[in-house]
Amino acid sequence: MQMKRFEGRVAIVTGAASGIGAATARRLASEGAHVCLIDRHESHPPDGDHMALQVDIADEAQIEEAMGQVMHRYGALDVLANNAGIICDRSTITESNADTWARVLGVNLVGHAMMLKHAARAMKAQGRGAIVNTASVAGIRSGAGGNAYSASKAGVINLTMTAACDLGQYGIRVNAVCPGLIETGMTKPVFDHARDAGKEERLGSRCELRRYGRPEEIAAAIAFLASDDASYITGQALPVDGGNTASLNLPGMKV
Ligand SMILES: NC(=O)c1ccc[n+]([C@@H]2O[C@H](COP(=O)([O-])OP(=O)(O)OC[C@H]3O[C@@H](n4cnc5c(N)ncnc54)[C@H](O)[C@@H]3O)[C@@H](O)[C@H]2O)c1
């Protein structure tokens, strides 16, 4: 039987035009939420009482405007799935440039922080709310993204803790998911390259579950952390990675 943990609740999902965000919007809507899909590109809301807004989360003025529209339409905000993000090239630290750092941190960290700020203001007035940030295994270990991307995701994990400590007293929980390798728009080039080279079986083979993940598997974890099932969990970053970060995965040590 389909759970209805978000019946009548209002949720914002960022990065909702694609991948994990789109799957999260579908999941929350299927459990009864009114969902506002936010993306810099056009999003496609599921059937029902939902809305879609084109917003660049690197621009705080656009975030404030969007938040106003959500509050005007629904009068409340219960959930923020703070998920939009961008990747950067894998250049080494000696080759990296300041523009890349500023662009990636501007979306993945500052953009997340400003979404969190404005959502938390609305939630604080209500005395309740749940925020789930999308970090990454790249924020825990090296090897899953460029330097700027990984640092931005480590920042999101720390932001999750500091914001949880600021907001706990108002009944607002803040957690994060740390996805492993998931097939989405962001990772399409990796998947295309592996398939073209006939090496699809290598994708996710370093994970203990020996496979890559699906956006719906991250959406399920986000929905859990956003729901009352997680009512005593805050300030945590949950790897959803097929066991990838559980192992050092040293060459030659695997049976
Ligand atoms: N796919 C993976 O393997 C993986 C692993 C770990 C973490 N993540 C994280 O998951 C989140 C979702 O990514 P995805 O894999 O679904 O990728 P995706 O590219 O399919 O989706 C990301 C969405 O974010 C939107 N977006 C990017 N910058 C934006 C901005 N400034 N304002 C508004 N929207 C913006 C994009 O338009 C896109 O629709 C990201 O934060 C990403 O870093 C992904």
Image (cartoon, grey):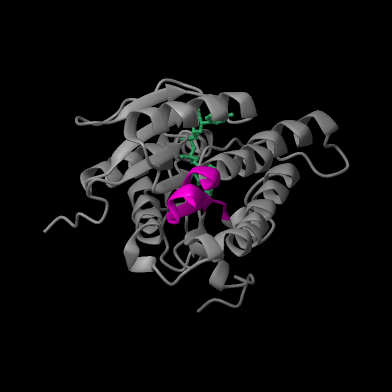
Q: Residue furthest right?
A: 94
Q: Residue at x 40, y 54 (%)?
A: 222
Q: Is residue 108 visible?
A: yes
Q: Is residue 174 left or right of residue 139?
A: left
Q: Nearer the viewer, residue 225 or 9?
A: 9
Q: Residue 132 appears at what percent x and percent y?
A: 48, 53
Q: Is residue 56 left or right of residue 16?
A: right
Q: Residue at x 66, y 43 (%)?
A: 109
- In the displayed structure, 201 sits above or below 98; it is below
- In the displayed structure, 229 sits above or below 137; it is below
Q: Is residue 89 visible?
A: no
Q: Is residue 152 left or right of residue 77?
A: right
Is 250 one of the magenta-colored residues? no
Magenta stretch: give its range.
120-136
Q: Residue 8 appears at what percent x and percent y?
A: 24, 45
Q: Residue at x 32, y 67 (%)?
A: 229
Is 122 one of the magenta-colored residues? yes
Question: Which image quadrant: the N terminus?
Answer: bottom left
